[in-house]
Image (cartoon, rainbow, N blue to C red):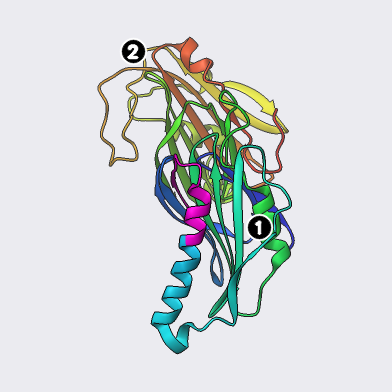
Amino acid sequence: MTDATYEFGWRKFRLDVPEPWEPAHFEGDDAKGYVRLDDVYGPRLELRWGLAYREDACDTAFEQYLKGLRRDARKKKGAGVFRREPKEVALVSAWPEGMKGRVARWSAEIDCVSAVVACSVCNRLTALRVLFAAREMRTSVARRILESFRDHTASVDAPSVWSLYRMRFEVPSRWRLAEHRFGPGYAEMRFRGPGRLLADVRRWGPAEVLLRRQSLEAWYLGQLAPGVRVEAGDLDRTEVRGDEVLSFERRPGGVAAVLGRLSRGKQARRRLALVSAGWHCASTNRLWVVDVYGASLDEAREAEWRAFCHADAEEG
């Protein structure tokens, strides 16, 4: 197992995980949900969360978890006998302010480090499971994951970081993920902000294949929403981190925003302002388009979106 890690960011959760571990399953929303990260050998990390308002939520959930493990082992009889009984361990030296966590380690058909973490700041209760093959236990890997775990932004106004599949971007704190779609060579995420604000983040790859017979300009114009008519001469051109960025703006009434692109192409009747940018990230061989819609150009411009392309990029 590699020692190289990246920061995984999803619904205001942030934690460092080994590079081969990628998201494989998503459920729920900010208040209640589940996400699982896999590698080529199978599941490696699970997070399940919900809202908790009781001060003893962490202790209660942790004790119930251990009881459930032992109960399931008895039901399975021989197949579920522990090679190492569930035992609480002091794996994390100190949890961040406002967070309380308890950790257990056990071994049966698999090796596992489990944690229950409650946060008094965001009122979320999170159960984490770091999974290893039998006799593969890597305590140092589990410790690094748990010690890096954060379940909310540093402040109410701080942007939330989304980081997965070698994408990384920051979303204003009051925006929420509305829809998403991930597939081979393509990723799309839609966010809704206050009022009529919304944004689409889309990424394609590999870029060298998509640009083999067309220019970046022609490709970008082909990705615009139906109803958007832009000529090549209308595009602004800038350079960020050595990559050419194409962009344009349209005032309300000049674009029929396709709010339901992910919902089988249902077109909304509202006509919104649009601030759009597209670029080729050479270092990751990917193509990006970020579209921000608003009731006015000023509203769309001030949405404070920052797309970094990938985890090791810096803001331009």
At x 61%, y 37%, the residue is: 98
**Few, some or many residues within 10 Å of mark 1 (<14, 14–19, 20+):** some
Res 19 label: 1
Which span of residues is magenta-colored?
48-63
Question: In the image, 54: left or right of 116?
Answer: left
| Mark count | 2
Camera-side residue of 61 and 43: 61
At x 44%, y 68%, the residue is: 68
Residue 233, relative to residue 188: is it above or below?
A: above
Asked whether residue 55 is drawn in magenta, I would say yes
Q: Which residue is mark 2?
A: 253
Residue 271, relative to residue 116: is it above or below?
A: above
Question: In the image, 33: left or right of 290?
Answer: left
Spot occupied by residue 203 in the image (x, y as percentages of width and height): 51, 42
At x 63%, y 61%, the residue is: 20
Amino acid type assigned to the residue bearing label 1 in the image: Glu
Camera-side residue of 205 and 87: 87
Q: Who comes first in sequence, dot 2 or dot 1?
A: 1
